Amino acid sequence: MRAIPTWVDKVHDRDKVEQCIWDLCFRPDGSQLIVAAGNRVLVYDTSDGTLIQPLKGHKDTVYCVAYARDGKRFASGSADKSVIIWTSKLEGILKYTHNDAIQCLAYNPVTHQLASCAVSDFGLWSPEQKNVSKHKVNSRITCSSWTNDGQYLALGLYNGLISIRNKGGEEKVKIERPYAAGSPVWSLEWNPSRDEPYDILSVADWGQRLSFYQLSGKQIGKDRSLGYDPCTLGWFSKGEYVVVGGSNKQCCLHTREGVKLGVIGEQESWVWCAAVKPDSNYVAVGCQDGTIAYYQLIFSTVHGLYKDRYAYRDNMTDVIIQHLITEQKVRIKCRDLVKKIAIYRHRLAVQLPDKIVIYELYSDDSADMHYKVKEKINRKFECNLLVVCSQNIILCQDKRLQCYSFQGVKEREWMMESLIRYIKVIGGPSGREGLLVGLKNGQIMKIFVDNAFPIMLLKQSTSVRCLDMSATRTKLAVVDEHNTCLVYDLNTKDLLFQEPNANSVAWNTHYEDMLCFSGNGLLNIKASNFPVHQQKLQGFVVGFSGSKIFCLHVYSMSSVDVPQSAPMYQYLEKKHFKDAYKVACLGVTEGDWEALAHEALEGLDFDTAKKAFIRIRDLRYLELIHSIEERKKRGENDNMIFLADVYSYQTKFHEGAKLYKKAGQEQRAMNMYTDLRMFDYAKEYIGSGDPLDKKMLITKQADWAKSSNEPKAAAEMYISAGEFCKAIDIIGDHGWGDMLIDLARKLDKADREALSRAAMYLAKLEQYPYAAEVYSKMGDIKSLISLHVEAKHWEDAFTLVEKHPEYKEEVYVPYAQWLAENDKFEEAQQAFHKAGLQTEAVKVLEQLTHNAVLESRFNDAGYYFWKLSIQCIDIAREEPDKREEMLEKFHDYQRRADMYFAYHSIQRYTDEPFTSHLPEDEPFTSHLPEALFNISRYLLHMMQGGIPYGISKVGTLYALAKQSKNLNGFKLARYAYEKLHTLRIPSRFQEAVDLGSVIIRSKPFQDAEELLPMCYRCSTTNPLLNNGGNFCINCRQPFVHSFVSFEVLPLVEFVIEEGITDEEAVQILDLSIPKQKKEDKKWHESRMGQAQTLRLGDETDEPEEEDPFTAKLHSFEQGGTEFKPVRVTRSVLQSLSRSEVYVLKWPKPLRYQFFKSLLPDVTITQCPFCHKLFHTDDFELQYLQKGHCPFCRNSQED
């Protein structure tokens, strides 16, 4: 640090008496200096020290001045007890007084409130207030200062205490300091930096100490002893330094921690005041003898560099190490003035005023930035330059070099002939490093740390300013005092070349033949003997690594990326591809790599080209190089063909073709042009009339026409080249049907591939007649049928199938699928049936059934289950191996069909909305209560064999309970309600069930006689519900129901004895003679001669012959557990009347069922399709309503 006096003035009064400078301050923009001298206020221009104007207004000595932060006004305070406010135009605008002399002034930096301090009180004035609010203090105020935020005012007192007040003047903190009584606080000021985490108050007292405090009163660090009485204290704008002056007749510079850095100026009397110009390095000093001195402080750069690590001094006491590649920085706080810095590999040496500290890196990692103290040499050294090595430090003082160990032991000393101008460590083994030393007399020496004898490398006539040695130590670059860069060959000592306008030089550490030097604001890069490449750059070049140049400009070190394009192109011009590649590796752009790759490829330097193409990831050229290398291995060595390949890849097609022709490879040229669709050029290289070549060319031309969106031309070319399939593809894709059929008609019948493709496209275009014509031409019946199926021309397809039944499945299966897709499931099922695909037919029916159940269409579900059962019979008949399984399914499906059919009525009864006009608010139903009653009983009996999905037991019991109650079947109704309470009942039924359960208890516990069913076989009266099933409790004869009202029909099933077939039994029945009905007469007439008599009931009846069938009815075990059917013989069959027997003619493999009516007067109708039995009246009513059987939906017309 150096202090340069800019100007000095000495103030006298009229009588030439020296006037003490009590205070001074700067205008915030730094343009003026306000000085308190005698009873005047002087205003100076800071640029040259001229007195702008003396201000008179005080009658006694002016003790203090202060400028507002906004620069609009300043104030002065005097021994005449008054304060004057002045404008920036140097006009007095206000004056107010205290009871004592004014000691100090301070403007609030935020609110611009002025604090004026007298001996016993202080006042607070602001432009908005008319009055000055004053506050008493119990000791003399010597100094004052506001915090940065303007919230608190610190007052320094003569009794050694510090009082911190708020903006209202109230004391908030009192700092009581040790030794306060004999140590008046003479100066204090808050650190102006806004970057600090807390406010810092610096205090100078006449106990000769410099101290620092926080706002809370807590001391920061320890007291710094000054050795003199301080009279003034001031901070730099950014808070990095403090200036202190006083009885030592000096103004000194200290760090923010109080460490003394140096003297700003020596004076001849006490320094009473000092101020730092805002945001600059200028300091104004005022003295007892009237001297005003204005100094500029120059902070010299203290730094060191080794390769990519740069160490420099910051804030005079810190060392910052910067990694120039990664831009990482670390700070080492030395807490003392840093005088010299040296860095080498993992070592760092820092010289402080009384010692040298050596640091080392924590690890050998090249990116590690953490240093630790290795050694301390506690000695004061004087030197011009400091250098550090692995195990030594070297001090340079004028002509002398001294080598010390890290323990401070002097190991070696060298004396030079002339002053040492430049020194640099050039590396070497640990403890044996080499130094490059440049002298003023032009000598350049090499010194080894472990060798007492310097080696002279060369001597030049001019003084050395800067030196550097190349990476292999074969070349030396020197910058002399005339700013000339000279490069020598160290082996021959010859001057290789020299360049003007250089102030520093550096060799590239990665490339031997390249150096850079700076000067005149330009950066010069020189490779080999090529001309210099220049670009703008301010500062000094201090290092060159790869494509990074390290440049020191003023105080900052920066790394500049410089592309090595220029030297690379210089090498390429000379066809030095390998050197160009080495330069490119230092750092060039993507485009430069590409240029290098192509140049090397054209120069047939495949190795360099390969490396360059790998760098830019160009796989296409890498494949080319790989193929050339493979061909070379196979013995090809015609460089002309290789170069032609390269030109072709580089789109230099004509040059490539010419080289192919020269090498006798016209075929390659033709192939290249045809691939490029340059057919006119290709024709020039066709061999003499080779038809294959011509055909190939036409085909390729057609390919090109196709890809270039000229399809018609492409199709015609393909036809002329005989490529019919490709032509058909194009014509078909574009929908040109007429062109397609014309081509198909011209094609030979044998060209089946082209014909079938043409037919396929015609079908796609829905030109079905044309497609059929083509298939007919080919004789392809299967494809023709497929075409009709695809076109949905079912009639045509059926006609063909009649002639060719082997294709039946190809028609009926798609037909069935089409029907299914159009929701014609029943027709679809029939079509599957026709196709002989029973499994598919069953699947369709199963799906229909499943959907019907899910959608609660139980009527449909019953119908579909019946259809399924019939399907099972067909499968059982056609596939004997599945007979047992299918018969089992048949019975299951029949049972389900019956139950779903019956449940349909229950579901309608329970689910449809209630209507008010019906009795007892019953749900609407087309069935009479008796029918619902019978259906419910029938379902409950059937449920004992399992409940199919979708059928609700709750609904069935609910309907049974309601109808039983209505028909006076109270016992059954009570049973139904009790059963309902064991089940989960839907909420809509809950109230009705609860109410019904209560009401039924008021009814008698019995069922009406007329409700109880009678067995027509044994005449036993049965209960309404049989837990065993739907049969008589006595003879176990199953009941037969009418499938509308579900009443029990007066039928008894009988079986034929063994030896009689079903068909034979029917024949016997058909031939049986019906019995004459006996006349039932009560009156009997007789004639005897002439007399006629009438008698009433007085004749006894002849004993009637018992019917053989009736005799068989009682062939059962009374109350037995096994059912014994009525078994009839041939003679019994003959005795039966055909009109009283109903035969259910089930298809094979089922047997017929025979039923005998025991009440011939009750007419019964049998459906010939589903074999269900009905009361004739019920059946006819349903048939009239629906037009078909209510169960199987078949009509009599079918």
Image (cartoon, rainbow, N blue to C red):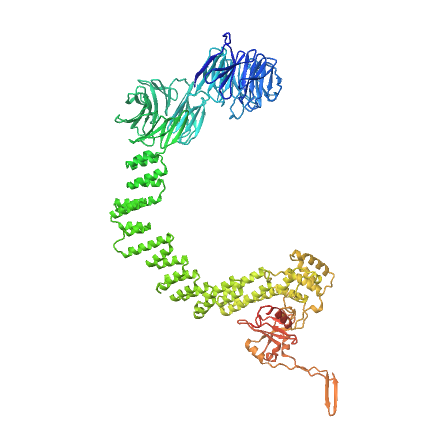
Q: Where 592 sits versus 155, above or below?
A: below
Expressed as whole percent of the image width and height from the top left, the position of residue 212 reads: 53, 20
Q: Quadrant of the N terminus?
A: top left
Residue nearest the observer in this picture, 851 or 236: 236
Residue nearest the observer in this picture, 107 or 59: 59
Expressed as whole percent of the image width and height from the top left, the position of residue 297 reads: 44, 19
Residue farthest top in this picture: 15
Residue nearest the observer in this picture, 566 or 994: 566
Expressed as whole percent of the image width and height from the top left, the position of residue 152 reads: 58, 22
Q: Quadrant of the C terminus?
A: bottom right
Q: Where 995 sits versus 640, above or below?
A: below
Q: In this view, does 1027 lie to the left or right of 412?
A: right
- Asked if residue 64 can be seen in this view, the reply is yes
Residue nearest the observer in this picture, 348 or 651: 651
Residue 911 placement: quadrant: bottom right
- Asked if residue 144 can be seen in this view, the reply is no
Disc tally is 0
Q: In this view, does 353 lie to the left or right of 681?
A: right
Expressed as whole percent of the image width and height from the top left, the position of residue 148 reads: 54, 23
